[in-house]
Amino acid sequence: MHLLPFKHGRPIRAWLFAAATATASVAYCAPVLAADSYPTKPVRLIVPYSAGGGSDVVARIVGQKLTETLGQTFVIDNRAGAAGMLGTDLAANAPADGYTLLLADAAYTINSSYYTKQARYDAVKSFTPVILIADTPYLLMVNPGVPAATLKEFIALAKAQPGKINVGSSGNGSGSHLVGELFKLKAGVNMNHIPYKGAGPSTADVMAGQIQATFAGAAGVVTFVKSGRLKALVVGSAKRNALLPDVATFAEQGFPDMVVSNWYGIVTPAGTPRPVVKRLYDEIARAIAQPDVRERLTNVALDPVTPSPDQFAQLIGLEMKRWAQVIKEANLKTE
């Protein structure tokens, strides 16, 4: 079975290095007029999920630093629902003036293929990419009471109880949903998908024992794993994560070509003046370079990355193709 242009085995960081080398001539350095006066009022940063997930963590870390450095409040506006489409649609229809931003993640590139009729925006045409902030590996986590200590044992459990294991996600069509579907294809297991309005509620129900497992980006859940409230069976990075050194990778457990991570970036409504986009890129990149911000990101398993807007746009295009293929091969249909 052939899967995806990335073959699920090329980390985002490796792709960014290749993109930077191949596209250095198109880096975001075109001469533009300065936008030194921006911002002159509070900026709304829409997070299309409930509080507590990885997107919310990234938005609050970066938003706080921008508030400090730019002298205007970056207001985090959580608008959960419809696998991120509710908040994304809200951002797409906001004025293109730089005062409404969207915290995009993997689901941003999935929805146009998964929700072919429901999505009222186009991930390419409706937005202008500003900056990719960070990426984090996906984890498969279970309630500590689940009788599986390894991925192999979990697969055996799922095969012994087809359709009985409930696996949560951030919502239908979310990145965690698609990673779960990819895993089911690879492992040959039948598990019941339970969609939530964000990683926070899904994680909470695993800890409470309402469902057995969930896939989620490490950024929003690493503290729960370290405290023992969740049991992580596998990490989606190419190498073991420094914060979770005892959690084996997919490759170590028999899935050498499955490297899966979630990424977080800022986009703004299409038509936002180029000088404003440039100012946003410069200020966010500067914020991410600060030692305190980098420490806060890495402490929750986020790997800071700041490619140019042009390179970020290329990544969005590739990710759209990548997940469209998973949707096709898993025969996923919206209700």
Image (cartoon, rainbow, N blue to C red):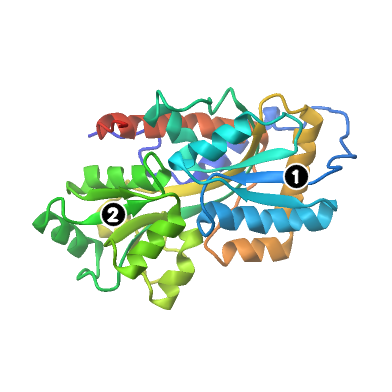
Quarter assignment of residue 282? top right
Q: Residue at x 44, y 33 (%)?
A: 111
Residue ranking furthest to the left: 160
Task: Bin the neighbour count of mark 1 within 10 Å (Cα to Cα): few under 14, some 14-19, many 20 and up.
Answer: some
Quarter assignment of residue 131? top right
Query: In terms of depth relative to the viewer, which is nearer, 159 or 209?
Result: 209
Query: Which residue was labeled with disc 2?
Result: 167
- For the image, the number of numbered tags is 2
Query: In terms of depth relative to the viewer, which is nearer, 212 or 234?
Result: 212
Q: Looking at numbered disc 2 in the image, what kind of residue is underneath it?
A: Val
Place of residue 267 in the rendered image (x, y in percent of width and height, measured from the top left): 63, 37
Q: Is residue 219 left or right of residue 69?
A: left
Place of residue 76 in the rendered image (x, y in percent of width and height, measured from the top left): 66, 51
- Tell me the quadrant of the picture where the C terminus can be found: top left
User: SS at mark 1?
Assistant: strand
Q: Residue at x 17, y 48 (%)?
A: 190
Quarter assignment of residue 99? top right
Query: In terms of depth relative to the viewer, which is nearer, 165 or 264?
Result: 165
- Tell me the quadrant of the picture where the N terminus can be found: top left
Q: Is residue 249 left or right of residue 156?
A: right
User: SS at mark 2?
Assistant: strand
Q: Looking at numbered disc 1 in the image, what kind of residue is underneath it?
A: Val
Task: Bin the neighbour count of mark 2 within 10 Å (Cα to Cα): few under 14, some 14-19, many 20 and up.
Answer: many
Q: Which mark is residue 43?
A: 1
Place of residue 240 in the rendered image (x, y in percent of width and height, measured from the top left): 41, 63
Location of residue 248 with respect to 136 vertically, above or below = below
Q: Is residue 206 left or right of residue 26?
A: left
Real-space Cα separation, disc 2 to disc 1, in angstroms: 36 Å
Place of residue 165 in the rendered image (x, y in percent of width and height, measured from the top left): 20, 56
Mark 1 or mark 2, which is nearer the start of the sequence? 1
Q: Is residue 129 visible?
A: no
